[in-house]
Image (tube, grey):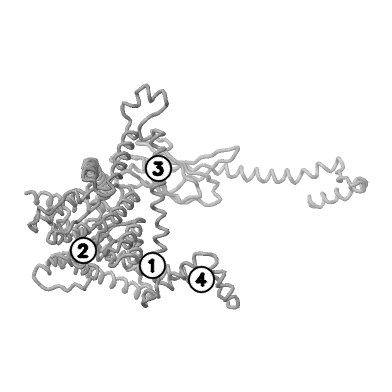
Amino acid sequence: MTVNNRFQLRLGRMPPEPRRRGLKPRLPMGSYSICVHPMLLICLVCGLCAGVAFAQGLAPPTNVTAKDTPNDDGKSITLTWDAAAEDSGITVYQILRGTTPETLAEIGALDSAEKPTYVDASVETGIDYVYVVRAVSKTEATEETADSEITEPVQATGQWFHTGKIPLFCAMLIFSAAIVGNIYYARSGKEIFVRRIPGLEAVDEALGRATEMGRSILYVLGLGGVSDPATIASMTILGQVARQTADYETPLRVPCNDPIVLNVVREMVKTAYLNEGRPDAYTEENIFFLTDSQFAYAAGVDGIMIREKPAAVFLQGTFYAESLILAETGNSIGAIQIAGTTSEHQLPFFIAACDYTLIGEELYAATAYLSKEPMFLGSLRGQDWGKVIIFGVLVLGLVLEPLGINWVTTFLQKVVN
Amino acid sequence: MKRQVPLVLCFLFGIVMILTEFSPHSDSQELYKEVGRWYLVITPFAYVIGVMTLVQVHGTRIRRRAEYWQYSYVVFAGMILMVVVGMPTFLNQTPFFQARGISFGLQSPVFEWLFEYVQVPMEATTFSLLAFFIASAAYRAFRARTFEATLLLISALIVMMGNVPIGDYIWNTVMGETPWTDGTSWARQWILDNPNLAARRGIILGVALGVISQSIRIILGIERSYLGGD
């Protein structure tokens, strides 16, 4: 007779009275001992199992390796070890570090559910360290640990070249070679065709209109600093505009958002006026610092537009949310507006509100287009070569990917990342 | 010599700064940070010149009684007030201000009050003008006079309707018998993910190549506009 059968047999002997009174049935005194038996058995089995586990001991982490982290600044060491089985009982790994086996001390911990990799980013370059990974099995009542073997001494060293950036480096070299090659091509005197850019063709028209109307020209460089490529491109266009305003004696007003840009622009416009033989026409106070606050700058430029009603407004450089505030105000005063920016989010606003807009790279092409310098034109041709290369690689990737060849897409992903 | 030294420095620093991008070594990264700090050192000096030009421009306006010259006094008043309140000067030690619990400096309640209740609302006001400017610019841009403007109008209508719940409500009411639901928001997402994203990526690629090209011109000394001349 099994324990369960005997248990039910005892239950069957229960007196019926309590049921009738709606009370819970009570077991007779003698039956308690039989009821506890299975519980005891379960406890016994569990205890035996636990005893066997404790007797075997917690398995220590295996294959623990400590290596200098690749492609870093020499401030970290990476530890790896084999993942333990799910039923190993390990709850957490403790990481111990020391310069000698005697000085080992805990520096961190890792949950056993995580990937068995630990990056120690608190090391000093050039010092030998040894590590131990300690497996910990922790319950409310007990705690058991098992240490791995001590690793070989390892030093953190910095790398001079990031091998993960080789694809990016290659891409940079290819594009640079294309641009430099075309600059040399242009220096040889060969003619280079540049497509018509309406926004730049309109510069003469805008300057002529301002001169005829006897009004000023307002040149806004945006919110970019002097290290912003779009601001540098804008300053170059300003130099070309300043040459013509010097010739026409048209007032040129440049409110600046950045004091360093202000100083560069002053020098640049002054040089342009000197080169045109009109230093007397240069007015330094027409190039001034307004504010470095975004919307205060927008309000200030709007005020200048409303008060002075310039005949032509140039909005060239880096713009953010103030772009439409400026462009719409310029539109409301009837000025001819030529905008140009590399901020793709602001381009729709300029296209909607301005007469001409230089879209993205056209801003960088402006120097070459306006000056017609062969070397600038060569660099422009190099840019186009770059586009052809990118297009070719994209098409190659599209063709090879369905065929299961994915080195092109892998290369492109590495360049982007 | 005045031109050669900056050009040589530009070439050297240009090459070195490019290489720091590819070198994770601590010396390389420290050099990168150090050069950034040099740039920060220059900024305060440039600000002095910036403030000087501001004073010069508005001083001239007041002197010449130019149009709306009175507002230049507001500029001076605002500038002086913020400088006085924002700098922890000897005024913090004067019994007059100490007795009244008034302090000066960037953390002082007066400065914070001026910033929170004067500067921020004024900037927010200017920013909110954008809503009206968007409406007026959209009205002009969306007039269906040409094929491109018509295309723009249709795309804009779909994107706008896809952004509000009533767009899908209209679609589901009209096209309720068909198996396609929420067609307006699907069309909006398709426009944003395909033609819009393709155009944006094209622009970004062109800009990136333009930046490379310009950087090479500057490093090689072909482009010299940043030197303050051509």
Give the letter of the chain under mark 3.
Answer: B
Q: Which mark identifies residue A354?
A: none
Please provide percent x and percent y for residue A14. Answer: 89, 47
Give the letter of the chain under mark 2.
Answer: A
Q: Front-most of B158 and A118?
A: B158
The residue tagged with tag 3: helix, strand or loop?
helix
Is A185 positioned to the left or the right of A168 in the image?
Answer: left
Mark 2 is surrounded, within 10 Å at the Cα level, by few (under 14), some (14 to 19) or many (20 or more) other residues, namely few
Please provide percent x and percent y for residue A186. Answer: 12, 69
Instruction: Residue at 31%, 48% (x, y): give it.
Output: A72
Which residue matches tag 3? B118
Of labels 3 and 1, the one closer to you? 3
Contact between labelled residues 4 and 2, with CB atoms less than 8 Å apart: no
Is A13 positioned to the left or the right of A185 in the image?
Answer: right
Of labels 3 and 4, the one closer to you? 3
Instruction: Residue at 57%, 75% (x, y): give it.
Output: B174
Contact between labelled residues 4 and 3, with CB atoms less than 8 Å apart: no
Of labels 2 and 4, the one closer to you? 2
Of labels 4 and 1, the one closer to you? 4
Of labels 1 and 2, the one closer to you? 2
Is A238 positioned to the left or the right of A26 in the image?
Answer: left
Give the letter of the chain under mark 1.
Answer: B
Above or below, A342 against B91 in this view is: below
Above or below, A361 against B109 in this view is: below
Q: Give the alpha-carbon distance from disc 4 to disc 1, as whole Å.
A: 18 Å
Q: Give the alpha-carbon distance from disc 2 to disc 3, as whole Å.
A: 39 Å
Q: Which mark identifies residue B197?
A: 1
**Earlier sequence position, callout 3 versus callout 4:** 3
